[in-house]
Amino acid sequence: MNKTKEIFINGFALFSMFFGAGNLILPPFLGKNAGDLWFWVTLGFFVTAVFIPILGILAHAKLQGTMYDFGKKVSPTFSLVYCFVVYAISIALPAPRTASVTHEMAIAPYFNTSSLLTSTVCFSLVYIFVMNRSKLLNLIGKFLTPLIILILLTIIFVGVFTTPETIQTSTFTSPLISGLLEGYQTFDAIGAVVVGGVLVISMNFKKDTSFNEKKELITKAGFIAGFGLLIIYAGLIYNGANFSSIFPENANRTQVLTSLSTQTLGSIGTIFLSVLVALACFTTAVGIITGTADYFKGINNNSQKVFTATVIIGCLLGIIVGQFDVHYIINIALPALMFIYPITIVLIILNVLPEKYSSALVFKVVVVVTFIFSIPDFLGFITKPESLSTIKNTIPLADQNLGWVLPAIFSFLIANIISKLKKPA
């Protein structure tokens, strides 16, 4: 019983860690556009927002190290650069987005103040909390997440059993791919490698806990967190589709979530949800800034000056970027995600696989090939699409921004064959 309780506590902690701004605002909007094809969109979203992130936790269970260990088989230099890029993206995009969501959902509907003021107040508080490592965060984490889950499950339950209007026709031509790519925006795969390592280290294991016992605990906790995410995501996507004809035609992501909570719980529910969203976003920002500062402190001889400087830079970026609206931040995040997400996905999968299928050669070949074939996807968001038409027409799935997938699979097979041939008989 004690062990079961520990598994559920850690599973709940993992769920809390993943659950941030994107997890709330993306699924209902996706459902709104998915309409009658909501199931296929949910399936695609599940792959990149649940399945891959939980594989990341399973990889941490296997490695029981830090984020650096994910890429060290490619090379130590690559792993350092990869960690730097991921942490830089984390403090420049998902962290500021928390302030943007807070403003649009919790401040703007009730107060006529600027988004710059909101982001300044948010990240001033983030700075205070990170620098003081306040115990209040633990209290917020304990009571906040259950309340958010309770309210979201209530919204989902009421929505499912409310007689809907006619579900609209989907606006997606490739619903599975649309759901898969929107899952990038949750940053959950990146979150798995960023915060998963911190969780592994910070878990309060008993001194006599063996490696295999830790592995079992982390693995089962990962499945619990994944199941929770799946229920919330599927419910919000379905309700987004269910009420698709009621939402304003040009409603953005935050407006759709707010409208959904109003349709199901009324104005009081919307107010309560707004407050909880603000707090959830705040703790997410604190977690990202703390994790990033800890990393740079660690690679600089545990320098407190480096820690403080990283926190200041992260908070300044939060204030500057966080004043923009959510839709704008999501758009500027896309090129970065198209660049780093494929590499993160292949690193997660390779680290989960048995050693006999994931030699250093396999890591090197697959990561290099994935990097090369993800370049057109990255360039597609910063240049005119016509300039890449020849490349896009040549590479399978490139039109769906998944041109790296088949080359990565093919290179994995070839590298494994070469590895087997190299082994002495």
Image: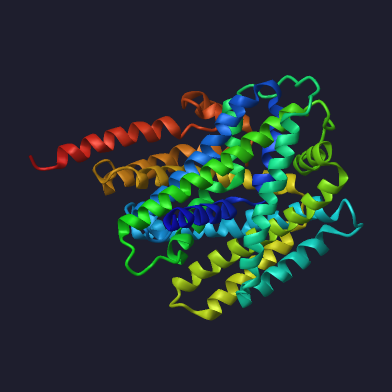
Seen at 63% across and 64% down, the residue is 286
Report x, y in % for residue 396.
Answer: 47, 25
29 to the left or right of 174: right
Look at the image and tell me whether residue 387 can be seen.
Answer: no
- The answer to whether residue 117 of the structure is visible from this angle is yes
**Relative to 346, does residue 102 appear above or below in the rendering?**
below
Q: Which residue is drawn at 72% across and 28% down?
A: 241
Above/below status of 369 relative to 222: above
Residue in the foreground of this view, choosing between 13 and 167: 13
Question: In this view of the protein, which residue sits in the foreground, 152 or 66?
Answer: 152
Residue sitting at the far right = 112
Residue 310 locus on image (x, y percent):
58, 71
Q: What colour scheme was applied to this rendering of the protein?
A: rainbow
Instruction: Write down the quadrant of residue 33 in the picture.
Output: top right
Which residue corresponds to the image point at 42% horizontal and 53% vertical from the top-left?
218
Q: Residue at x 59, y 76 (%)?
A: 308
Q: In which quarter of the image is the N terminus?
A: bottom left
Return the x and y of residue 68 as percentages of the image width and height.
Answer: 40, 60
- Report the number of discs: 0
> Front-most of 265 and 48?
265
Q: In which quarter of the image is residue 385?
A: top right
Residue reaching furthest to the front: 1
Q: Residue 32 in the image: x percent, y percent?
A: 73, 30
Side of 423 relative to 350 (left or right): left
Q: In which quarter of the image is the C terminus?
A: top left
